[in-house]
Amino acid sequence: MSRLYFYVAIAFVTSFAAVSWAARGFPMHWSEAASVSSLQQSPPPPKIPQGNGQAFPDNEAALVKGREKQREYVLRVLDRPWSSRCTDDGRALFIDGLFYYYDYRHRQTESYRETYGKAGADYIAAQFSKADDSRIERLTQEAYAKGYLKPQDFRGAAGQLVATVVKGERVTGKGCAG
């Protein structure tokens, strides 16, 4: 179990570092002096994305794989038996798994919007509109309706995103109490 947490932590840190680097415009340090004329030029506007990440930097393929890994992990958490959410360790795994997914999703959404503007916002919205994302949202709504989670279980932006996902759902179960 601790190995799983270790791998999730490594994936989160790696993804955070990659997104942070992307948000700063992929700075690279050159050993030769830069000319003044190259410093005075404004950067070109981002290209309109084609839906496959081609308009974004070379590491976009790695970020796409990171999103796939994040989906795989949270789906494994959501596919665990309902009763596992009633133990201390099982509940922690359940809440943490959902937190990391929704926090990661929020951070990527904000980063692409801030870095690439409308083109980035449209692209990342499409990236988080895959079938697995819809399934994750549906399973989150189901867990909320059965009383296994509430948006207050999540910190910061992840809680706001979960609240948006479960908006309109009615709690009909009592979770572990029922």
Image: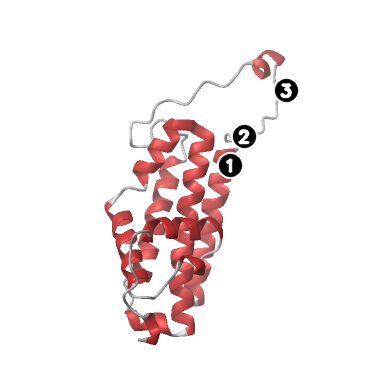
Work out how far the residue at label 1 is from the one at label 3, CA to CA, in angstroms. 22 Å
Choose the circle earlier in sequence order: 1 or 3.
1
Mark 1 is on which residue type? Answer: Trp
Q: Are marks 2 and 3 in contact (CB under 8 Å)?
A: no
Which numbered marker is on residue 66? none
Q: Nearer the viewer, residue 82 or 175?
A: 175
Secondary structure beneath dot 3 equals loop
Q: Residue at x 45, y 52 (%)?
A: 105
From the image, tell me which residue sits under label 3: 33
- The answer to whether residue 65 is left or right of residue 34 is left
The numbered dot on residue 21 is: 1
Residue at 33% x, 78% y: name it.
Answer: 173
**Residues at discs 1 and 3 in contact (Cβ within 8 Å):** no
Under circle 1, the secondary element is: helix
Which of marks 2 and 1 precedes in the sequence?
1
In the rendering, at what x and y percent does residue 168 appear? 34, 59
* Label whose residue precedes the other's in the sequence (2 or 3): 2
Residue underneath mark 2: 27
When asked about the image quadrant of residue 138, the answer is: bottom left
Three-letter amino acid code at disc 2? Pro
Identify the residue at image location x=44%, y=65%: 98
Q: Residue 38 location in percent, x, y?
A: 65, 17
Q: Tag 2, which secondary structure? A: loop
